[in-house]
Image: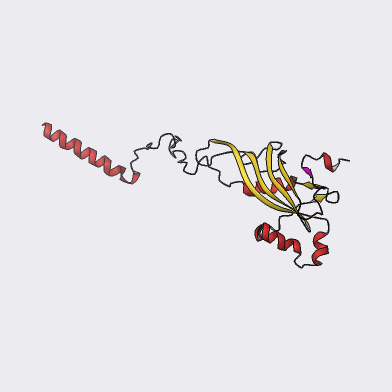
């Protein structure tokens, strides 16, 4: 049976657990979990995700505040050029002690943990909770990394905000040739253009005689 401490995403936090006011800084690389996007837009499994920030101990658990930076691979939805760049995401999440919330608020009430997170992390982030393992000895950040990055991935990635895309007629890259265009005659006026050419030819013939 695999031990918790052998997981590449398990961070030892026993030294600050249950001791409110203590902090533990993190500045290290962790392998990207599976399931972050796909082959079109995503982060490859096993690629290094840099995690920086710190765990802060409060009464009911630990709050992690920091930043994830992952190697993002995709292609521009306008010009189809490959995108390979670092993808930074700020994160604030909560790691509750086992049964800590139940002990604090019984059923459905608001605990002291909620009040403290609302102040530190904001209402929108107070529901992002992840497990502490081995009675609070380890914080498992695998799901945190996956959820944070999945939620932040762009639906329509661009190589740059003002990408001009490709010519709809010939596929030329409009970023490389901004003045590129095609002279196109509206087919609705093609008959008139033919008639005009015929009349001009006839007129020129009469003048030649």
Which quadrant of the rendered structure holds the N terminus?
Answer: top right
Q: What residue appears at the point 84 percent right and 43 percent down from the top-left corner?
A: 4
Q: What residue appears at the point 75 percent right and 61 percent down from the top-left corner?
A: 113
In the displayed structure image, the side of residue 188 where residue 164 appears, left or right: right
In the displayed structure image, the side of residue 46 where residue 204 appears, left or right: left
Residue 116 rendering spot, x and y as whole percentages: 71, 61
Viewer can see residue 63? yes
Magenta residues, dominant SS class: loop
Per the rendered image, the range of residues in magenta is 7-21
Residue 46 rendering spot, x and y as whole percentages: 71, 36
Q: Nearer the viewer, residue 186 or 57?
A: 57
In the displayed structure image, the side of residue 104 where residue 70 appears, left or right: left
In the displayed structure image, the side of residue 205 where residue 120 appears, left or right: right
Q: Nearer the viewer, residue 138 or 208?
A: 138
Q: What residue appears at the point 60 percent right and 39 percent down from the top-left corner?
A: 86
Tell me, yes or no, whether the highlighted magenta stretch contains residue 205: no
Q: How many marks?
A: 0
Q: Residue furthest right?
A: 1
Which of the 4 quarters of the picture holds residue 71?
top right
Tell me, yes or no, whether the highlighted magenta stretch contains residue 11: yes
Residue 85 rendering spot, x and y as whole percentages: 59, 37
Viewer can see residue 37? no
Residue 17 rendering spot, x and y as whole percentages: 81, 51
Q: Nearer the viewer, residue 157 or 80?
A: 157
Q: Residue furthest front?
A: 21
């Amino acid at each position: 049976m695999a031990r918790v401490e052998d997981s590449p995403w398990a961070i030892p936090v026993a030294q600050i657990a249950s001791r409110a006011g203590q902090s533990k800084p993190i500045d290290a690389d962790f392998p990207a979990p599976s399931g972050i996007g796909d082959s079109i837009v995503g982060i490859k499994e096993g690629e290094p995700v840099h995690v920086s920030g710190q765990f802060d101990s409060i009464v009911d658990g630990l709050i992690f505040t920091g930043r994830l930076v992952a190697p993002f691979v995709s292609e521009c939805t306008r010009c189809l050029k490959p995108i390979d760049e670092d993808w930074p995401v700020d994160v604030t999440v909560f790691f509750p002690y086992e049964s800590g919330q139940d002990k604090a608020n019984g059923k459905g009430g608001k605990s002291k943990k909620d009040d403290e997170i609302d102040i530190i992390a904001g209402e929108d982030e107070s529901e992002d909770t992840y497990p502490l393992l081995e009675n609070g000895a380890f914080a498992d950040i695998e799901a945190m990394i996956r959820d944070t990055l999945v939620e932040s991935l762009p639906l329509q990635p661009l190589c740059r905000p003002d990408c001009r895309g490709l010519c709809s007629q010939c596929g030329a890259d409009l970023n490389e040739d901004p003045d590129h265009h095609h002279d196109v005659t509206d087919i609705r006026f093609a008959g008139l253009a033919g008639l005009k050419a015929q009349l001009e030819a006839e007129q020129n013939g009469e003048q030649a005689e």
